[in-house]
């Protein structure tokens, strides 16, 4: 008997790659394609059946109206599981599709500053850094030294520390300030993952859209009410108008 951890690791082996006659296949062997005398069988609910002859495992698969799927071909003996292989493939494909849909690659943005930057430019650059971090992107901050400024690296260090402190609610120092030739660089990482930032952005966009639609609905309702009032008052005005009578001949 294998240990519990080993047993589940074998049963849930994600690779499910099979070695067949010197070739590698991404599809696991199932049912009569399995060519071994005995297998370590896992039941439909994940229970450990034990080592059984292949013929017995195939017989159980027929009784359960399921497939016998080789999930760990390199184990000795190979691990097979009773499952609905068609349903398993469909669910796996849907999970992979959802994972690709939600997958987001982390982008590294870059912001360049001078060690003696003026307050207005600093606020502008900081605003860009804030926006990048909110989007879930990393930001590479580069301090560019020129001429005699290269003899004052502490100016760049203090500026980087100041910027990191100003945006600490959104990001953290992922790579500490370090000299890189004439420049000094630091990398800020976002507290939120890219997927979380994208989800929040979508929610905010949906909220803004709903708000705009709400305003449009209110405006159209007000217009209808005004028209109704005008139409309702029109007969009254007509009733109050003096009626001319023909003069007597």
Image (spheres, grey):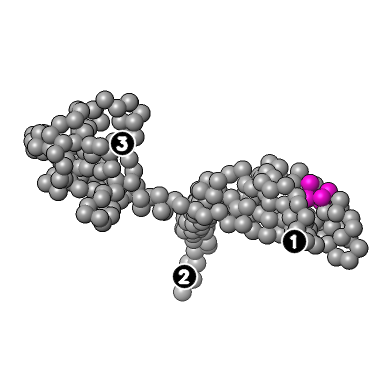
Q: Which mark is residue 10?
A: 3
Residue to which mark 1 is pinned: 112
Is 224 within the magenta? no
In the image, what residue occupies the spot 89% across and 61% down? 149
Highlighted magenta segment, given as a residue range: 157-161
Farthest bottom residue? 249
Element type at marker 1?
strand
How packed mark 2 is, by other alpha carbons closer than 10 Å (few <14, some 14-19, many 20 or more), is few
Residue 9 location, x and y as percent?
34, 34
Give the dominant element type of the magenta stretch: helix, strand or loop.
Answer: helix
Q: What kind of element bears circle 2?
A: loop
44 left or right, relative to 162: left
Residue position marked by numbered label 2 in the rendering: 246
**Mark 3 crowd level (few <14, some 14–19, many ≥20, 10 Å Cα):** many
Residue 9 appears in view: yes
Coordinates of residue 53 in the picture (x, y in percent):
12, 34
């Amino acid at each position: 008997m294998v240990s519990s951890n080993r047993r589940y690791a074998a049963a849930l082996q994600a690779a499910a790659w099979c070695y067949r006659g010197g070739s590698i296949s991404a599809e696991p062997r199932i049912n009569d394609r399995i060519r071994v005398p005995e297998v370590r069988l896992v039941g439909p609910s994940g229970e450990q059946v034990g080592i059984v002859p292949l013929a017995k495992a195939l017989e159980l698969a027929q009784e359960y109206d399921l497939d016998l799927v080789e999930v760990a071909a390199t184990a000795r003996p190979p691990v097979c599981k009773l499952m609905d292989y068609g349903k398993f493939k469909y669910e796996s494909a849907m999970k992979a599709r959802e994972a690709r849909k939600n997958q987001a690659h982390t982008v590294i943005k870059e912001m360049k500053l001078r060690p003696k930057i003026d307050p207005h430019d600093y606020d502008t650059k900081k605003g860009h850094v804030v926006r990048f971090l909110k989007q879930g992107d990393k930001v590479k901050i580069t301090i560019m030294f020129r001429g005699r400024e290269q003899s004052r690296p502490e100016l760049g260090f203090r500026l980087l520390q100041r910027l990191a402190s100003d945006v600490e609610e959104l990001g953290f120092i992922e790579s500490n300030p370090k000299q890189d030739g004439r420049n000094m660089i630091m990398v800020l990482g976002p507290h939120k993952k890219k997927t979380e930032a994208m989800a929040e952005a979508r929610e905010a966009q949906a909220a803004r859209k709903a708000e705009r639609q709400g305003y449009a609905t209110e405006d159209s309702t007000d217009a209808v009410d005004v028209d109704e009032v005008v139409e309702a008052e029109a007969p009254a005005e007509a009733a109050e108008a003096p009626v001319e009578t023909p003069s007597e001949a």
